[in-house]
Image: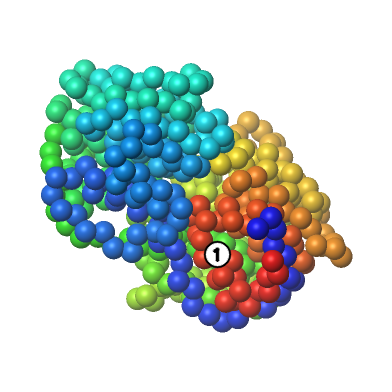
Amino acid sequence: MEAIHLKHTTTLNETDIALSSSKSESNRALIIQALSENPIELHNLSDARDTQTMMRLLKSDEETWDVLDAGTTMRFLCAYAAVGTQTKILTGTPRMQQRPVKILASALKSLGAKVTYLKKDGYPPLEIKPIKTQKTNNLSIKGDVSSQYISALLMIAPTLSEGLNLKLTGKVGSKPYIQMTLDLMSRFGIESDWTGNRIEIKPQAYQSGNYTIESDWSASSYWYSLVSLSQQAKIKLLGLRSRSMQGDTAIVRIMNSLGVMSAFEDDGVILQKIPEQRELSFDFTDCPDLAQTIAVVCAVKKIPCRMSGLESLRIKETDRIAALKKELKKFKAKLKEVEPGVWEVKSKFETQSEPVEIDTYEDHRMAMAFAPLCTQQDLIIKDPSVVNKSYPGYWDHLKQAGIEIQE
């Protein structure tokens, strides 16, 4: 399907939405399960394509692992291959082959793995031969590039003969995702010590256990946006916990400023409209996946918004900063860097009489972040299947909420 037409819908049906499960939790839990010599049962795994790809490849004996466009899967499997028993080649889509992996690969080489780049130095595809003898248990890694590199190393650390002392250098981004990794490891018996900028994990065995994956807080952000931008809405999101491992629970705090109140119940959270504040400033270092959603909401509401911590958006499924600039411009809104590392959303938002086409840049979050603009006018969303990467049921759920979608 090349495009879908979202009809202008100002009022949402009152409904319960069963969100996809967290792919962040799912992918970490699957690696832990694969590393464990003791049985681990996982429940409510994500239906996201990234997670389904991870599951398929972990069961595969093929020499080549094609991760498609799944960045988390690429990074976690690189580390997993380094402590495995077989030589593996990891590859992916053309975009995946433009996403750097050198920092992680260099760390794995320092530990004793043999890494060969098969095309461009520092990028997939690459061949990884497992560690035979661990060369060191002391590593330093930049903290501001991708927390997934750090999580990948932490999960294999207990299986290394000498464990791992990991030093994080510079500013550390997405800290909640690193903590999520350590918390999930702890659930299966792994002890760790994170003091200052150092994380120490001694050699030890993952223990057996059961774990049920929580719903995805990243996915919830699009519903917060829809409630904020609609004239009338009351939505219940099922399976979310008030005490969560996921860093994107920050959406609760941010959206309380943008007109959405969160009321937690035993089985989820109810979103209801409240008055919004008239300006916002937020550091997205720990929750970069929320940035697109917030930029769109602030543009529509003409709320001046200062955003920092966007550095990692350049190396996601697309250059998300460039993509946001292009799409916001269609509505007379701007995303402008006003000082190094600080961006501002400035808006003279206007609706248009004809449907506006939204390019999605092979990025699931571009599609889902801009879809709530259907509360303002008709939209054409190009390449709508990109949502399969993290939230395959997204369009069906919009229909459940009363949004008419024409294919």
Identify whether 217 is placed above or below 310.
Answer: below
Left or right: where does residue 103 sit relative to residue 187? right
- Nearest the viewer among 93 and 290 is 93
Q: Quadrant of the C terminus?
A: bottom right
Left or right: where does residue 402 sit relative to residue 53? right
- Nearest the viewer among 407 and 268 is 407
Residue 178 in the image, given as x and y percentages of width and height: 35, 42
Residue 19 in the image, given as x and y percentages of width and height: 46, 67
Q: Quadrant of the N terminus?
A: bottom right
Q: Residue at x 44, y 41 (%)?
A: 67
Residue under numbered circle 1: 394
Q: Amino acid at mark 1?
A: Tyr
Identify whether 34 is placed above or below 299.
Answer: above
Q: Residue at x 70, y 69 (%)?
A: 406
Q: Residue at x 77, y 66 (%)?
A: 378
Few, some or many residues within 10 Å of mark 1 (<14, 14–19, 20+): many
Residue 31 in the image, given as x and y percentages of width and height: 29, 45
Question: Farthest residue toward the right?
Answer: 353
Q: Quadrant of residue 307?
A: top right
Left or right: where does residue 386 sit relative to residue 353? left
Q: Quadrant of residue 340?
A: top right
Q: Residue at x 38, y 29 (%)?
A: 89
